[in-house]
Amino acid sequence: MKKLIYCVAALVCVFSFLGCAGQQNNNLPSQDMLDPPNLNGVWQALGSAHWNLEGQNAFKGPATDVLGALGGIPAGVSYVEGGAIPYTRAALIQREANREEWNKLDPAVKCYIPGIPRQTYMPFPFHIIQSDNKIFVAYEFGSNSRMIHLDRPGTRAELPSWMGYSTARWEGETLVVVVTDQVAETWLDAAGNFHSEDLVVTERYTPMGPDHINYQAVIEDPKVFTRPWTIQLTLYRRKGNDARILEYKCVEFAEDAVYGHLRKGEDMDQPNVKKLF
Amino acid sequence: MYLPKYSFAVVLSLFLGTQTYAEVPRTDWGTPSLQGTWDFRTMTPFERPEQFKDKEFLTDEEISKIETDRAKAWEARGNVDFEEAAKSEGQQGDVDVGYNQFFLDLGTKVNGTKRTSLVIDPPDGRVPAPSEAAIARYVEARDMWARPPEGPEDRNAFDRCIKGFNAGPPMTSGAYNNIMQIVESEDFVVMQAEMVNDHRVIPTSATEQLPDHMRFWKGDSRGVWEGDTFVVTTTNFNEHQMFRLTGPNMTLTERFTRLDEGTLEYKFTVVDPDTYDVPWTAVMQMVKTDADVYEFACHEGNYAMPLMLKGARKQERDGTSKEDDTWLPSWSKPRT
């Protein structure tokens, strides 16, 4: 398996002229003779996409009273091609309203399944287990997961779900995953960016070497956006003892926010979050 | 890459008189393939019923009768007026454990082992008597579950959507969602139960146990192939671990053996000196299915938790907390 990774890495280097000294192979098989790239392993996005896809200054978060400097929200660049998300006029008003009270409205604050693409760039690792016809992705955040079907081209789910329905194909070295049938309740980040039930996400996972994947997601939703738009970020391989996902069952950490007002002695009429059931 | 293929294993062993294996799908790296979706519904009881006191296996005729009787009872249940039946038993009607035929997906077949119970060791098919300390621990938890909850932590891990009641580890057949799926690479086997969608990513080469202070809701699982059996050892459970009265120091050993194209044997052994003086073992056969494992968004749809908490607060306001326990499902009420 490791040989395969090195073989694929060498190919990427040769074809992209990255100058990977010492890895050239004059007897490389043609692309159609190769197995698909091996994406097995533990990966994680760095950066601030989960806070705000469009980028932001650092600012004081709602938890600085108890967490101090650890509770601030970090600055970040835009991961959106062109910088801004092309909302319709009405949808932009909705996004601003979401942003106004984001921590009371954000589904991920409540530990609801973040959906795709947000689950990919949550600040937690995820583990890809790849077989020839199925790819299972196990995410640490929430112990969530999804099955990616390589053997069901063009099919759709019988029902919508929080993680949607993922079918995939290989285009050369790129794993192309089409995600449909997601519920409308998930957000794209913690900044109020949202979508409708018509969301279709086309993800492209392209190895950039043994330890990096270029992650691109095209987001289409005519109810909310004026045109398809694209985000791009890098996924990094976790290595050594760090290359495993642990347990972050977020329910136990969301219960204060979700049910705190219903505890004994609290004011039932003053919930910490909104849109709860 | 992974390419399932068929092969006949250990043909020569026929002549050598050792164990033989049926044709099973194998991975490109030679191990039996466990990949697929597996159904672990069964009507075989976990422990051996009194009526089969000294009987380990059922005959085909007995199995046929048991399954026929179950089918008739199931059909009859479909015609029951739950509201009236529950009231006649002093229950609250269909608001109390009101699962009709649509929701229940119990097994309708005796397990492929043809045994009278899933427990096979001790030989009487019964889980050994737990220690007094384990019983006391359970009673304390049960009493907490039986009182109006002061907060979500007063409810059990299943009500909180943190764990699935049959998802394990170990996996056990329950009222519904008795299905799990496996995807495998050479280095990892991932198992996901439908109940609460929990998954375990299990390394296939023996890895070191996590430090003692790291404790998980579902423990830490490590695997190794022993011949054609995938053996998974799970330790490092947290203090909420209560499978069959076990505690956080349980060592669970699960053994997965693909018997043929459609059958996966699942055997597990519980070792927990805090709870049981002796280890005990259960075994069942899971059946391959074309059905899908669906998303089980438990927490996202947990209407029960806020309703229980609101009910408890209302009872406090009304001063009825002690006299009215109708909010509590009958199966959660203390039993003598």
Image (tube, coloured by chain):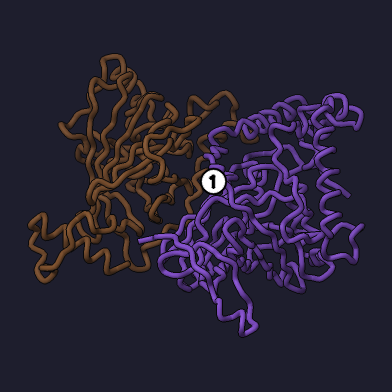
Report the side of B325 relative to B211 (left or right).
right
Nearer-the-camera pick, B179 or B66:
B66
State which quadrant residue A68 falls in.
top left
Mark 1 element type: helix
Task: Find residue B23 and report its horizontal and vertical position in percent.
Answer: 56, 65
- Where does label 1 land, which residue? B197
Q: Amino acid at mark 1?
A: Asn
Task: Find residue B314 and report its horizontal and vertical position in percent.
Answer: 71, 26
| Residue B135 visible in the picture | no
In the picture, the quarter occupied by the N terminus of chain B is: bottom left
Report the side of A169 relative to B299 (left or right).
left
Q: Is residue B321 above or below residue B110?
A: above
Report the side of B37 relative to B166 (left or right).
left
Q: Residue furthest top?
A: A90
For image coordinates 35% across by 21% down, the residue present is: A97
For image coordinates 32% across by 47% down, the residue present is: A69
Q: Chain of mark 1?
A: B
| Residue B302 visible in the picture | yes
Q: Which chain is purple?
A: B
Task: Find residue A79 and report its horizontal and vertical position in percent.
Answer: 22, 38
Q: Which chain is brown?
A: A
Q: Residues within 10 Å of mark 1 (few under 14, many from 20)?
A: many
Nearer-the-camera pick, B108 or A139:
B108
Nearer-the-camera pick, B308 or B176:
B176
For image coordinates 65% across by 35% down, the residue present is: A264
